[in-house]
Image (cartoon, rainbow, N blue to C red):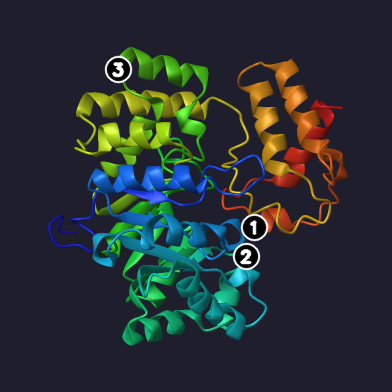
Amino acid sequence: MDQERYLGASTPKLGFGFMRLPKLEDGSFDIEQVKAMVDRFMDAGMTYFDTAYVYDNGGSERALKEALVDRYPRDRFTIATKVNARVAESAADARQQLATSLERTGAGYFDYYLLHAVQESNIDRYDEYGLWDFVREQKKAGAIRHWGFSFHGTPALLEELLTKHPDAEFVQLQINYADWEHPEVASRTVYEIAREHGKPVVIMEPVKGGMLANPIPQVQELLREANPEASFASWAIRYAASLDGVITVLSGMSNIEQIDDNLSFMRAFEPLSAEEQQVIRAAQDAFADMESIPCTACRYCTDGCPMHIPIPSIFAARNKQTVWGLDEQAKKDYDAAVGAEGAGGADACIACGQCEAACPQHIRIIDALRTCAAAFA
């Protein structure tokens, strides 16, 4: 792909993911902090904002309106949002999501519009609802400028989709150095397939839900030795942004400190050097030897759980136990998570499987919950 000509070649390589926004104690968004974060992002010359119809039950899109759209000229930024077939009850319901997203954001149009989290468990619904043709129609109508899809499936499915829909303009992929050779996520393989089809890539989860901002001890030691001044997150984001054909790298920033750190190295982005790439390869080897639950806390698994199990919180507690050896704190975290009103414990799982169908990390959640139940019994 010609680096000078692909869609998004001139887009700044740090994108603002509106998925993990800061919240107040009552659970509402801290809009004043979000505004300050948006201001810093815009002042640094960044332009790309990513949200979705399903994020925080629409709260993310409404926050985008209040913090960005109502406060800046429309030609100074680009917005990406998504249609989610999994939560729609009919084709009409799915198609209505675009109008709802336009109303929530007040954006007038979307620069990038995506079929959301496409994978084997939901592809039939995207086909059944005719959403591929729908986005084509909406591009012609001017409601969207570019369309693509975010993807969490197998390499074989991605190959099939890009062959079947060659006019898709871009693909959003989970890419980070820990998942580059992961057998389930297969970051390297799906990235190479997208490139072979000439598609530019938006990168999501470069810090793996925050996991690479606080990596396992062995990796921390490697990164500190290589550059004691660099944040752990900087290694992850720069790794992703160093790939060819990238539109932007999304970071789900949750506070002022995170956005300031990200801007410190992405304002004048420099790709990883050959020496830095060697450090990353050593970090990848360390991750390959470590057993942990690769949960990014996206919470897709919890929406339909009939037992209301706080799965991401349970997995975080288990990782604190296995990776960090913090048994006492892990038990406190577990008890706090399952002790919340209405929450079920790991042993409440009835193995219905809805969580595994929704999980973009392809975690064997049922088995992992059984392990957690035994560990925290």
The residue that disc 1 covers is 358
Q: Earlier in the sequence, mark 1 or mark 3?
A: 3
Q: Quadrant of residue 270?
A: top left
**Which amino acid is tagged 2?**
Ser
The Cα–Cα distance between marks 1 and 2, rounded to whole angstroms, is 7 Å
Q: Residues within 10 Å of mark 3 (few under 14, many from 20)?
A: few
**Which amino acid is tagged 3?**
Asn
The Cα–Cα distance between marks 3 and 2, rounded to whole angstroms, is 42 Å
Where residue 22 sits: x, y (%)? Answer: 53, 42
Where residue 223 sits: x, y (%)? Answer: 37, 19
The Cα–Cα distance between marks 1 and 3, rounded to whole angstroms, is 38 Å
- Residue at 45% x, 35% y is 178
Q: Earlier in the sequence, mark 3 or mark 2?
A: 2
Whether label 1 touches label 2, CB < 8 Å: yes
Q: SS at mark 2? A: loop
Whether label 1 touches label 3, CB < 8 Å: no
Where residue 91 sits: x, y (%)? Answer: 59, 84
Q: Residues within 10 Å of mark 2 (few under 14, many from 20)?
A: some
The residue that disc 2 covers is 121
The residue that disc 3 covers is 227
Q: Earlier in the sequence, mark 1 or mark 2?
A: 2
Q: Residues within 10 Å of mark 1 (few under 14, many from 20)?
A: many
